[in-house]
Amino acid sequence: MSKRYCRSQGFTLVELLVVIAIIGVLVGLLLPAVQAAREAARRMQCGNNLKQIGLALHNYESAYRVWPAQSSSPSQGKGFITKRGSWFTAVLPFIEQDGLFQSFDGNYHWHDPQNADAVSAKVPAMSCPSVPDRRGFEWTVLVDYANATTTSYTLSARDFYDGATTDYANVGGVGTQLNAVLPASQQLHDPRNCGILKSTAVRLSDVIDGLSNTLLVVECAGRPELFQNGRLVGDGASPKTWSGSSSVTRPFPTGGVWASHNKGFTVDGATPEGNTAIRPGSCSINCSNDNEVYSFHVGGAQTLVADGSVRFLTSSLPIDQLVALVSRNGHEVVTLD
């Protein structure tokens, strides 16, 4: 009787290793494409957020014939008499947040305990989905209760409440040091107040450079944490122990709050390494979020133009071109691809 031998139906170790290696290679090839597709979707969502904000700003201007003011000056508009607040608060009814607008008491500063519940409310349209997790800084430090109802305030470690953050900010103007190094023909008469959304209200007729040549809102993402060239620069302090004013170790802790009048900034430029202590700097975009245009998108940042369009500005944009886009009345000719 002859013996019959049957080969096992399973894989040998070598075959299994080969299959695993092939799967690993395929995953390695597909992963960048998947990540790129996800980032493209996040970038599109970020642009849609800015479009909503732009529509709200235009509806506000149409209703009150003036753009909302950034900070302490009383803003035009029914029921909005904030002492210190944000233009974001003024346009809440125009982004389907009328309930949140009604809960914000304009008779008090945004950092008063009276407005604690309203200011801590997160609004989806105010956050870019490309921003990494803030590791516990999703809520940022505000001011101590003792000084909350005065026109000036100090940060303190005594009493805190939380404020929801935003990744979008207005650019009120240009730093005087940056303006001074521009060619004489490009220097602005009033650089710190040349933007549209600033401390005092601006009318549509004041935008003499044209709506399509002037910025309304830009990305300044990741605050209150400090980022430089995509790298988190931490100072080791927790939000409940830090006190002080804005610094290069943590940019405007209250500036990241959507209701804060400190949310806006003037463009100074950063060094290519992300240092904003050396002013002015030649880098216009994505070098630092310490009061500069900054995003977590590859190659540039999303911006809202005054005509309501969203424009992606590349990281290679010369600083003088950014200045020209910020200014509403500099008589500049902006030529961008």
Image (cartoon, rainbow, N blue to C red):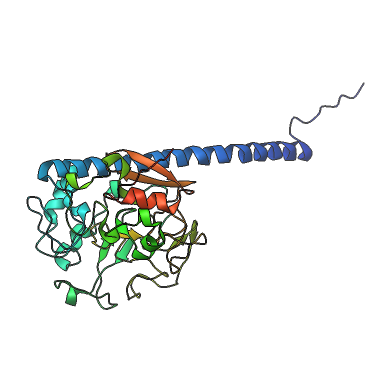
**Residue at coordinates 19% horizontally, 53% vertically from top-left?**
89
Q: How many marks?
A: 0
Using the image, determine if residue 270 lies above or below residue 217: below
324 sits left or right of 158 in the view: right
- Percent position (x, y) of residue 42? 41, 42
Q: Quadrant of the C terminus?
A: top left
Front one among 5 and 294: 294
Residue 220: name its quadrant. bottom left
| Residue 220 in view in this figure | no
Using the image, determine if residue 12 lies above or below residue 143: above
Front one among 280 and 219: 280
97 sits left or right of 125 in the view: left
235 sits left or right of 189 in the view: right
**Residue at coordinates 30% horizontally, 39% vertically from top-left?**
212
| Residue 67 in view in this figure | yes
**Residue at coordinates 27% horizontally, 63% vertically from top-left?**
262
136 sits left or right of 17 in the view: left
- Percent position (x, y) of residue 210? 27, 41
Residue furthest to the left in view is 78
Using the image, determine if residue 34 lies above or below residue 239: above
Front one among 151 and 155: 151
Residue 312: name its quadrant. top left
- Percent position (x, y) of residue 233? 47, 65
Residue furthest to the top in view is 1
Q: Quadrant of the N terminus?
A: top right
- Percent position (x, y) of residue 134? 40, 59
Residue 118: name its quadrant. bottom left
Using the image, determine if residue 300 lies above or below residue 25: below
Residue furthest to the right in view is 1
